[in-house]
Amino acid sequence: MSFFARREFFKKTGLFSAAGLLTGIQPSFASETFLQRSHGSNEESLITDEDFWYQVQQSFTVSPGLINLNNGGVSPAPRTVQEAMKRYYDYSNETPSYYMWRILDQGREPLRQQLARLAGCSAEEIAINRNSSEGLETVIFGMSLSAGDEIVASKQDYPNMINAWKQRAAREGIKLVWVNLELPSEDEDYLVRQYVNAFTSKTKVVHLTHIINWNGQVLPVKKIAQEAHRRGIEVIVDGAHSFAHLEFAIPDLGADYFATSLHKWLYAPIGSGMLYIKKEKIAGIYPLFANENPRSEDIRKFEALGTRPFFIEQAIGKAVEFNEMLGLARKQKRLHYLKNYWMERVRSLPGVSLHTSADPRWACAIGNMSVAGKTPGELDRFLLEKYKVHTVAIQWENINGIRVTPNVYTTTRQLDQFIEGVRAFTRG
């Protein structure tokens, strides 16, 4: 491929954006290889093309001595994102008050446009913050609720969100109604019914986790949201694990409020997040950090965080470009393939139980498994000590096992080492 052909491609994908020129960072070798290998390729064969995904791996700086299968906690960023963040940090330190507030901060509006394009919504509905917890707690603590109002949530939701609702209940007398899900489930009617059966005339809000972090269960958020809206109930969606993991537009979920951590599946710098609030709902939410007009209809009122790491924020744009280059549909298929790859090879081992669906409608990258008679911690330690495979032990409510989360830089050869480790554990 000629230099001029590559240049035209990078222009179209935004890799020669103003932010890119400022950082002086060129696309990685893997980016060029991606273009060459994917042009005219059969889409399905590309999902299992290990040579291609090995080149994608070269865009990352992952440890050669440890196989990271805990990408569900926080994902490493591609090299171009790391380099952008480091360069912005050095740039900021030349004269912080000038370069941060007068130069880098000017990049927030273009970044807002980038995120809105990926989210399928208006830029006037996107606020940039630090993580899912901050975004969701902005909504949880910013809503106007009264004693006796009911909130429906799940015992399988994320602890920070559960604790936020409990704090409101303790201070203000709102009532929490808990749904206890039996997972994994491929029964849409069952999942929808658990929430609908909990709704009453006093229900004001339903809190939904799009992908449950403990075992990767995808909830039918759209169907539940439709039922909630028929009853005048507002819908909060925890999208920590779904944004840039599944291909969807936020408005299509029926969410009134949605928050995500961009350092998970978007591969942005650690400590970056995004909050979506439907335009007509913005005025009704008080910001977590006060400003002069808390009832403003401007989404930017949620960004009054004081001095913030602009070098982290502006590097998010490189992560957006990386995902757009890779393609969300292709990425989702690869992640689902990797999860099923290891699940299919351990499911018949003695004592092994799988706690995640193999159906792409109900799970993607995140999987959970256990071995009878052994604790999740024992399996987690064995894999790390004997096979240098990093997973995470999960013991939460009725979900017990190790969570296994590969990523786009994970190869099947690495998963084979994990599989061999599980096989050895079941023999031992």
Image: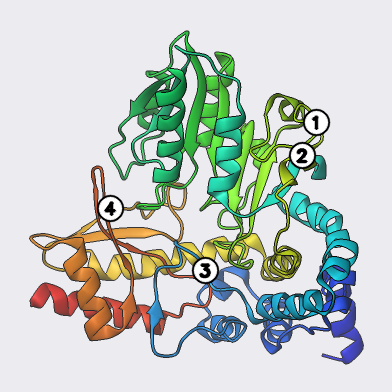
The earlier-in-sequence mark between 1 and 4 is 1
The earlier-in-sequence mark between 3 and 1 is 3
Residue depth check, mark 1 versus mark 2: number of the one nearer the observer = 1
Gap in angstroms between the C-alphas marked 4 and 3 = 22 Å
Reading the image, the residue beneath label 4 is 355
Where's residue 49, x and y in %? 53, 80
* Image point (62%, 77%), residue name: 78
Q: Which SS class for mark 2?
A: helix
Reading the image, the residue beneath label 3 is 75
Gap in angstroms between the C-alphas marked 2 and 4 = 41 Å
Question: Does the CB distance between marks 1 and 2 fall below 8 Å?
Answer: yes
Residue depth check, mark 1 versus mark 4: number of the one nearer the observer = 1
Side of 96 where 58 appears, left or right: left
**Residue 293: numbered disc:** 1
Where's residue 344, x and y in %? 30, 66
Question: For the residue carrying disc 4, how many other residues have a C-alpha within 10 Å: few (<14), some (14-19), or many (20+)?
Answer: many
> Which is nearer the eye, 242 or 6?
242
Name the quadrant containing residue 107.
bottom right
Residue depth check, mark 2 versus mark 4: number of the one nearer the observer = 2
Q: Which quadrant of the figure contains the C terminus?
A: bottom left
* Image point (23%, 79%), residue name: 421
